[in-house]
Image (spheres, grey):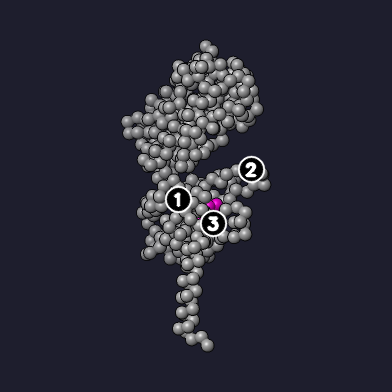
């Protein structure tokens, strides 16, 4: 007959055995997901979350990670984590994850919620960690649980705090309602007196200014990008297809330390270069063509963004040179104004003035640039003065399909208090630099 002591002794023994078995079967570091935080240690992301919670002060904030990629194709697109979620957690290999923050809670102020495990599916795809200390150690969260408990957790926290913080993003009326707003609506229907506070500007205001460690990764991405563009310039040959040149470019990115592509590479020859987001690859490079390459590597998830246009022959014709140097002059006019406190629209007008004076303004058909960081089109309010520490592209261009020509020059600039630094300076840019790189 079992008494209380026997039962407790048995339970303790069972727990010890379970712990030992868990220790024996737990995947070593580098196996199972999440593998940890990337590209920095957990304490970096913990500090970022603290900064956010210091601003919020109270209430509850929920940030959803990206959903799993749904594809029936033999080669599925890679999973890319939501930028805000990645910046706050460093968890980049777990689709469907959720972050909950409650700054005014007495002890536990943050939770990482992960989808439930499916051991049978994991035998086919990837092994995932069970709940426990190893998962907490890898992620840097004191509380890791499953997404199935999201509703009850947020409802309980909202009942105490009475405030729900929306961290974004703001989307158009025709887009699906953001998951956080959908969740908040359900909570507000069930907990009287709860209010919704718009904090959608907070994360962009923090992310726009790059930390030194972020800039280090972006410089590495720029170095790998330079290696790819130079390889393309040196190895291009008339008769080669765009796809063949793209392979040379991307191989060099990897050889130069690139860990991935910042975005899908554009390699366009002749008339194709006049299509701004050209997606083909079958064009054959002609002897007299200009080739436009808009492509860049990423390192640690941080992007670069560079476009170069160069002659397949290795030498610009006089007409090609005139148009190219006009684009370069427009870029230089905008870059000359770039420093902390400048308005983006003033950069745009500086570039447009160059094209207006040359009678070519109608051939410049897109925006001048965008912020870059963890996302290639990074977050930040470009209607406000640009701060020191932000990274932005300046990418004027001229496009004339009837003349079979498209020219774009795009560089990456770090804004400083007194001016800017061109992070992509390793990529040949002037006519003389391009022709010298292509000399063979």
Percent position (x, y) of residue 6?
48, 83
Pick the residue in front: 266 or 153.
266
Q: Which residue is mark 2?
A: 75
Vertical side of 122 occupied by 419: above or below: above
First in sequence: mark 2 vs mark 3: 2
First in sequence: mark 1 vs mark 2: 1
Q: Is the C-beta separation of discs 3 and 1 under 8 Å?
A: no
Q: CA distance from mark 2 to mark 3?
A: 22 Å
Pick the residue in front: 282 or 1.
1
Query: Which contiguous range is marked in magenta?
Result: 94-98
Q: CA distance from mark 3 to mark 1?
A: 15 Å
Q: Which residue is mark 1?
A: 37
Residue occupying the point 59% across, 60% down: 119
Q: Secondary structure at mark 2?
A: loop
Left/right of residue 341 with respect to residue 311 in the rendered view: left
Vertical side of 223 occupied by 36: above or below: below
The answer to which quarter of the image holds residue 266 is top right
Q: Which residue is mark 3?
A: 128
Residue occupying the point 64% across, 47% down: 71
Q: Is the C-beta separation of discs 1 and 2 under 8 Å?
A: no
Residue at the far left in the pictured view:
418
Q: Residues within 10 Å of mark 3 (few under 14, many from 20)?
A: many
């Amino acid at each position: 007959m079992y008494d209380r002591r026997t039962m407790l002794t048995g339970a303790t023994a069972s727990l010890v055995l379970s712990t030992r078995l868990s220790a024996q079967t737990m995947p070593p570091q580098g196996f199972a997901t999440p593998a940890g935080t990337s590209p920095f240690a957990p304490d970096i992301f913990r500090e970022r979350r603290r900064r956010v919670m210091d601003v919020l002060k109270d209430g509850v904030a929920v940030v959803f990670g990206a959903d799993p990629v749904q594809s029936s194709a033999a080669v599925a697109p890679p999973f890319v984590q939501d930028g805000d979620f990645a910046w706050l957690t460093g968890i980049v290999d777990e689709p469907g994850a959720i972050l909950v923050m409650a700054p005014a809670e007495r002890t536990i102020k943050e939770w990482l919620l992960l989808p439930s495990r499916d051991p049978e599916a994991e035998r086919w795809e990837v092994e995932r960690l069970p709940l426990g200390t190893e998962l907490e150690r890898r992620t840097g969260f004191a509380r890791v649980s499953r997404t199935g408990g999201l509703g009850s957790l947020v409802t309980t926290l909202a009942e105490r705090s009475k405030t729900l913080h929306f961290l974004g993003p703001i989307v158009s009326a025709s887009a699906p309602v953001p998951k956080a707003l959908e969740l908040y609506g359900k909570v507000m229907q069930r907990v009287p007196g709860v209010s919704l506070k718009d904090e959608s500007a907070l994360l962009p205001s923090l992310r726009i200014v790059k930390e030194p460690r972020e800039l280090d990764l972006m410089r590495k991405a720029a170095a790998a990008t330079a290696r790819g563009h130079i390889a393309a310039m040196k190895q291009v040959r008339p008769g080669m297809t765009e796809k063949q040149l793209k392979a040379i470019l991307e191989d060099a990115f990897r050889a130069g330390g690139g860990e991935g592509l910042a975005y899908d590479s554009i390699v366009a020859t002749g008339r194709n270069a006049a299509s701004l987001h050209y997606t083909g690859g079958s064009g054959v490079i002609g002897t007299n063509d200009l080739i436009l390459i808009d492509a860049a590597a990423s390192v640690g998830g941080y992007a670069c963004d560079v476009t170069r246009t160069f002659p397949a022959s290795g030498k610009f014709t006089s007409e090609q040179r005139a148009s190219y140097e006009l684009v370069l002059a427009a870029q230089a006019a905008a870059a000359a104004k770039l420093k902390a406190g400048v308005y983006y629209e003033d950069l745009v007008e500086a570039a447009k003035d160059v094209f207006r004076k040359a009678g070519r303004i109608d051939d410049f058909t897109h925006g001048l640039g965008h912020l870059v960081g963890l996302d290639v089109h990074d977050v930040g309010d470009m209607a406000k003065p640009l701060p020191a520490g932000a990274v932005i592209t300046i990418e004027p261009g001229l496009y004339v399909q009837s003349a079979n020509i498209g020219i774009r020059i795009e560089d990456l600039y770090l804004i400083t208090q007194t001016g800017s630094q061109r992070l992509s300076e390793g990529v040949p840019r002037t006519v003389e630099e391009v022709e010298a790189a292509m000399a063979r």
